Image (cartoon, helix red, strand yellow):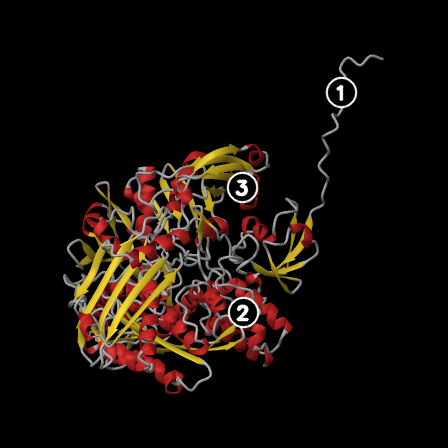
Amino acid sequence: MAQDHAVPAHSGDITPVPVHSGIVLQINGESYHHTGDPEMPLLWYLRDVLRLDGTKYSGEHGEGGADLVLVNGKATSSIGVPMSKLDGKQVVTVEGLVDAKGGLHPLQQAFIDEDAIGCGYCTPGWLIASMDLLNRHKDPSDGDINTLPNLCRCGCQTRVRSAIKRAAAAMKQGGKA
Amino acid sequence: MSGQTRLSRRRFLQVLAGTAGALIVGIRMADAADAAPVPMDMLGDNLYGLGLYVRIDQDGGVLIGARDPDTGTGVATSLPRIIADELDADWRHVRVVPLGLGVTNNNGKPSWTYGQQVGGTGNSIPRAWRDLRAAGALARWLLLQAAAQQLSVSVDRLRTEKSTVIAPDGRRLGYGQLAAAAAKITPPQAPVALKTADRYSLIGQPTGDVDARGIVTGLTPYSLDQHFGDAVVAVLAHSPWPDGQLDQLDKGPALAIKGVIDVIELKPDPALPPGQTVIAPAVAVVAETTWIALQGRRALKLDWKPGASGKENSADLEQQATALLNSDSAPTTRVRDDGEIDKAGRKAARRVEAMYYQPWLAHAANEPMNCLVRIDKTGATLYVPTQSPQQAWTVVQRLTGLPPDQIDIRLSRIGGGYGRRLDHDYVAEAVLLAQQVKKPLRLFWPRDEDITHDYYRSGFVHKFDAIVDAKRHIIAWNQRVASASALTGRGVSSDHLWTSEVGVNDLPAGFVPNYRSDWFSLTSSIPRGPHKGMPDIANAFAVGSFIDEIAHSIKEDPLDTHLRLIGEPRLVPLQGGGAIDTARLTNVLKLVTDRIGWKDWLRSVNGLGIACWYMDGAYVAHAIEVSMQGEQLTLERVVCAVDVGRVINPQGLEGQIAGATLDALSNTLNLAITIKDGKVQQSSWKDYPLASMAQLPNTVEVITVPGDGDPAGASFLAMPSAAPALANAVFRVSAVRVRRLPLMKELLRML
């Protein structure tokens, strides 16, 4: 049977877009479903898609540390991790450090009390790195604090050091700073 | 009912009744007040419409506008504190809002509602001290009049405290209860008297940053965090050379990416000075999101070819400078020539000579250059991280031709300025692109664009020679300085290019009878511009190091050398007016040396160094103690004393002093921009590495001298003396005299 109106055959170089079911992750305790580009770094998902702007850009490779977030409790460069690696993961950003009632974490209070803030742009990254440090060391030494990767041009480093120590003391007492 | 109190010929304090019984005291221009009355009903919510400084609501809440952009200098806290003190407001109920640019239309020309609005140049507090106190004082005066009427007590028997008027019999009226009545009182023609210092309740008391809670919770927005619902994102690839040309461009691969909207070429307008136009030829990728725009930029196939600047090398420039300073060439400008330098040599007991080399530097602000712009029928609205909103306005106005009041420049907290945001190339880029794509647009510079396309600080070479007489007095000081002026091409005549490079009153000018300061201009096409603490930082490093070298050469304790140089308590007149109070300079030096235990300076196994500086009415000294283990340099102690006159917020000042000290140490230890074949060789935090936590001292001990003189600015006061104090300490511990920065690289080379 002649096919007068034959459907053109596939030329071979068109491949159907694979159906991806998306990426489900928890951010600050809430569930999110990302169906966009799986290679998008978490930073741009947070900032451009969710408009959760507390996490800052400081460099393409995470140098500077302003883009740090906690992924399953560990400080992670959000510009260095694509969404594809975050399926099922728990992400905490600076906005998620407060308790359920919006009360400040002792570390946040310590940053206020020690005035550990210059322009404040890099502060979220310092908070996340400090949180990670306190998770690993209840009583961090100066040497432990020296391992923080963050950079700051306003010179908040000495005050961050005091804030970490103040927070560690407050957290040992189990209460709020 | 409303009224005005005259502040100056054209500026008035304006009193208005807001919605819901609020009292509003603001500032307005004479002509604007005549031409365009603001509808009363709108005022309650329109914080940007009037020059609002103070609003007192019926619930007792006090809203104070912060005039100058806060780049981390604390002015969003200290300026409102100055107003709140005059008002006797209860600080716990004060809320601070950043004011946008205040501009009205004066027959097509801009009238600046708030006078000068500029941040990060060290004069916000001195300016506020002159004019902002009047706003608080007027509001308090009106509230007192209202209270006097309600209580039937004469005003002079009433007092105020924490937003409350208190009568002699103990009756109290909260400001909120009085606001509506106060707004109906006719203000006096002349400004009311300001408080005397004994009645300050907030000034001089420590307080935290007003944005602190917002910052630690991630909620304080920076310009990069502001949004227009439908904005597209532009990311640029600039030519490596400011005078470069596009050699080839294939837009295809970028345009093929889903979500890329356009690829647009931008060029600088050669008729405009730097900082008002695009910084270098560029190709912009405009896309739906930042991530797509970044991918588009990566996919661009483009090549640039260099212009004349392609032959430039920072190492060659330094060689030229050195040759120039060692030659007999006449200087570009003889900045100062006291006494008779050529004859002073006859009494020479000792001659000391040295040369110092300092690299090019970048601003390296953490929040990258960005700008969010919407242009539509109603005008232009922009979120700009700028230190100078009026300059930003000028750039927008030139490109859009809009009437003055149809350009709305909104300010957020700013992620560091350091002088970079006094220029507005990125605003020009954003506006040009928004005009082309006809959509709201966010411009975003990735880090590599920021480090490679800056208005850099020039490298410096200093050549000093000094003569010391038999009584150890420095009787002659001849300094020759070479640099490429930051003012080149910025509308400054050639005989004033030195003003960004050398200070006519830089120490030890005025302290040495035969003193000469010569400046030699270097020619460079690498863009340059204003920097935090310029020109003091570069000169203080050389001067402070050289005084220490003189001390060493005459085998003397450098503190003694300093004290003899500064001399008896007296006023040393400054060229251009004012004077250095030598007692205050000596005092800061003694405070740091006492604190660090200077009497042991020679016996300590560690190295101790000191330096001091004078800058714009303020005095600073550093004492630094360092140790060395192999190649490991540790900053054991850093002490800084400052005298800024009256301190508005001691806690804020201490933070500024500690912060600027660390910034200066970071610069000194690590940082250099180098240029090869006209290209900046650094492009990230990896090769332009701000100091790590581990490199910096564990604490900075700050001593502030209480004072009652008019307050001086302090945001970069602590920078100049930090570097020489460090280099001097390093000399004591290692016997290596570092005459070239960055210090770590040179120290390791010479060890």
The amino acid type found where label 1 is placed reads Val
Say whether residue A5 is left or right of residue B260.
right
Front one among A167 and B60: A167
Which chain letter goes with mark 1?
A
**Mark 1 nearby-residue class (10 Å; few <14, some 14–19, many ≥20):** few
Q: Residue at x 18, y 66 (%)?
A: B342
Asked if the residue at tag 1 contacts the one at tag 2, i.e. Cβ–Cβ closer than 8 Å, the answer is no
Closer to us: mark 2 or mark 1?
A: 1
Say whether residue B653 is left or right of residue A13.
left
Q: Is residue B291 visible?
A: yes
Say whether residue A171 is left or right of residue B11.
right
The amino acid type found where label 3 is placed reads Arg
| Badge number at residue B297 | 3
Q: Which residue is mark 2?
A: A103
Asked if the residue at tag 3 contacts the one at tag 2, i.e. Cβ–Cβ closer than 8 Å, the answer is no
Q: Circle 2 — which element?
A: loop
Real-space Cα distance between discs 1 and 3? 39 Å
Q: Circle 1 — which element?
A: loop
**Furthest residue in direction right, as rendered:** A1
| Badge number at residue B33 | none
Which chain letter goes with mark 2?
A
Pointer 2 and pointer 3 on the same chain: no
N-terminal-most mark, 2 or 1: 1
Whether residue B165 is situated above or below residue B222 in the rendered picture: below
Q: Position of residue A42 (x, y in %)?
A: 61, 53
Q: Is residue B177 visible?
A: no
Real-space Cα distance between discs 2 and 3? 42 Å
Q: Which residue is mark 1?
A: A7
Front one among B722 and A54: B722
Q: Position of residue B740 (x, y in %)?
A: 40, 64
